[in-house]
Every structure is written in C-alpha cells, then in structure tokens.
Image (cartoon, rainbow, N blue to C red):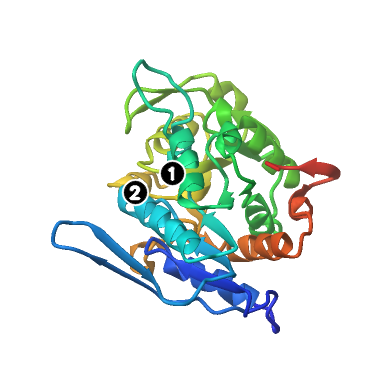
Amino acid sequence: MEKNQPLLDVHNVRFFSGRSNVPLAEKITGYLGVPLEEAHFSKFSNDNLYIQLGASVRGRIVYIVQSLTPPVSDHLFGLLMMCDIAKSAGASEVHAIIPYFSYARSDKKNAPRISITARLIADLLTTSGATHIMTMTLHSAQVHGFFSVPADPLTARMLFTDYLHDRPFDPEVTVVVSPDMGRAESAARFASSLNLPVATASKTRISDTKVEIGGLIRRQVRGFKEALVYDDEIATGGSVVGLSKMLVESGIERIRLICTHGLFLGNALERMAAIPQIEEIITTDTVYIAPEKRPSNMRVLSVAPIIGEAIYRNYTHQSINELFSFGDDPDYKEDL
C-alpha cells in the first residue's frame, strides 16, 4: 500500500533501477513516496555497457534496485557499474537492493578448482562502492556472512502466510512439504504460521535440470490429500516436478507450489502444467514475469511493501527485526 506522504526526505535520497525489474523498483518508490530517477543504458559496438545516472547524487543516499536474473552477467555488471558511478559521483551512501541474488547457490566448494562465487560477488559489490546490501530469501543462509558491509536478507514468508490465511486448511488433510533438507527449517516455520504439519523430502541433484527425490517422503505424507510445497526458488522446475509426481503417487490430490523467486526457466511452466494436481503456483515479483507469460493459476505477490518498509526503517535507524516476528514466538526473527 502506498503512503500518502513521503517516508523519506526526497531531497536527501536518490532511487535508481537497473533493467532487470523496473516494475518492482516503481512499486518500492511508490510505497516510499519518492521518485524513481532516470538511468540511461546502452551498449557500444564492442558490446561494452554504458550507463549514466540521470540525476545528481552528490552528498545523497543512493538506492539501486537490481535483481540478478537472466542475463545474469549483464545485470550483475550493470549493478556494479551503477554502484561505482554513485560512489565516484560523491554519494554519501550506496544501498544495493538485490531482490533476487542468483549466485547464492554457489556458497561452497563441492568440487576441486571451482569458485565460491557468492563470496566473490559479495566482495565485488563492496569494491564497487556498496555500503549496504538488502536482498530477499537467500538460497543459503551462510551467504549472509560473505558480505563485509551490513546486509539485510529479508523474507517473503509473511506475504504467503497473509495470502493463505483465510483458506480453510485442515491439519488432518493438508501438509507443508519442503523439497529438501536445506529448506526444512524455513518450511517448518511457514507450516507453524498456518497451524499445519510439515514433511521434508530428501533430494539428490543429478544435473542442473534433473534431481532424484528420496522415497521416504511417501511415508510422511501418507493420509494427506493436499500439499503446500514451499521452496525459496523454482528455476527449471526439476525439483518441484519430481516431488509433485511422487506426492501424487502417494495419494496427494491437490498441490500448491509456493516460492519466493519464480524464474521458471525453459519449459518449467509447461512441465508443471502437465501435472493437473498442481492447482496453484504462488510466487513474488522479485523476478519479473510479464503478465502475458503467467498461467491462469499463477498468483504473483509483491515484495515492494516489505522492501520499502525495510528501507524506511533502515533510513530512520529503526530495527527491522520487527518486520519478521513469527507466529506465536515474539522472540523469533528470521534471517536477521
């Protein structure tokens, strides 16, 4: 919901957007009641990127909104350039607002002679001039520790909880399912907010597009008829498609897929559409999905109020932990 009065001093801040998700940047600035300044992008004949910020940033607090969606390298380098431009032009602070941080999967060395790319990008952001990072639902919590400047990894869980709050879920019928052990704790908190039980699958990744789901999930969902599959992102759909098929074989009749980052790469949506038990796909606008590409059973919730409120509280030196108080546990704060 937009505010009637600007929440920030419009003379003291400057908001810019990269090219990955301008609609979300517009919603964030709409929430805060401040203008989204122009930025000019072009490429030279040798494929070099050219960016110029369209307003003075000297002595001002600068916010740059850019999701690291495909083409990831272009959007990443564009973000680094914009941070460097702001720093070089005399900005007092440079806040990189990264709704989707794609390299969060590259958080460890699981093979010889590979890069821990998430750490590399964290270092590049600092070198480029970012004084603060804000992102949404990191795939790996340990990526938070890679940043040498203050970083706020936010959560979209309350959006999903609010959206589903009035549904007549029966804990004897409906179960929340985590696709893998890495998301089990987050899924358990989400299930608790809806007073539902939780089950966790085991997953072995065979390739970038193929996974193997362990059979123990069959026993956990026995007797349930509806599943809420809760994940941080859906890329090619391999995990949720494989899991959904196993859930259907185990007696599940209705499936809702819930994810913060809906990339839906390649034929992911077609693969999900081939499973009629998938009744609804619920995601957010951290990744821009053109309206004409959204299937009729997709619901896109905006994270703009969460990011906007976090920016406001950061600007006014308030704690943002209060945004993420969870369920019946007032002491619980996720990710912060």
**Nearer-the-camera pick, 201 or 248:** 201
Cα distance in 3D space between marks 1 and 2: 8 Å
**Nearer-the-camera pick, 90 or 19:** 90
Q: Residues within 10 Å of mark 1 (few under 14, many from 20)?
A: some
Task: Report if the CB atoms under discs 1 and 2 are less than 8 Å apart.
Answer: yes
Evaluate whether residue 208 shows in this view: yes
Q: Quadrant of residue 336?
A: top right
Using the image, determine if residue 322 lies above or below residue 147. below
Using the image, determine if residue 148 lies above or below residue 261. above
Which residue does the numbered mark 1 point to in the structure image?
102
Q: Quadrant of residue 27?
A: bottom right
**Nearer-the-camera pick, 311 or 332:** 311
Q: Looking at the picture, which amino acid does disc 1 mark?
A: Ser
Q: Answer with left or right where residue 278 lies relative to residue 111.
A: right
Which residue does the numbered mark 2 point to in the structure image?
72
x%, y% of residue 248? 47, 35
Q: Answer with left or right where residue 226 lies relative to residue 39.
A: right
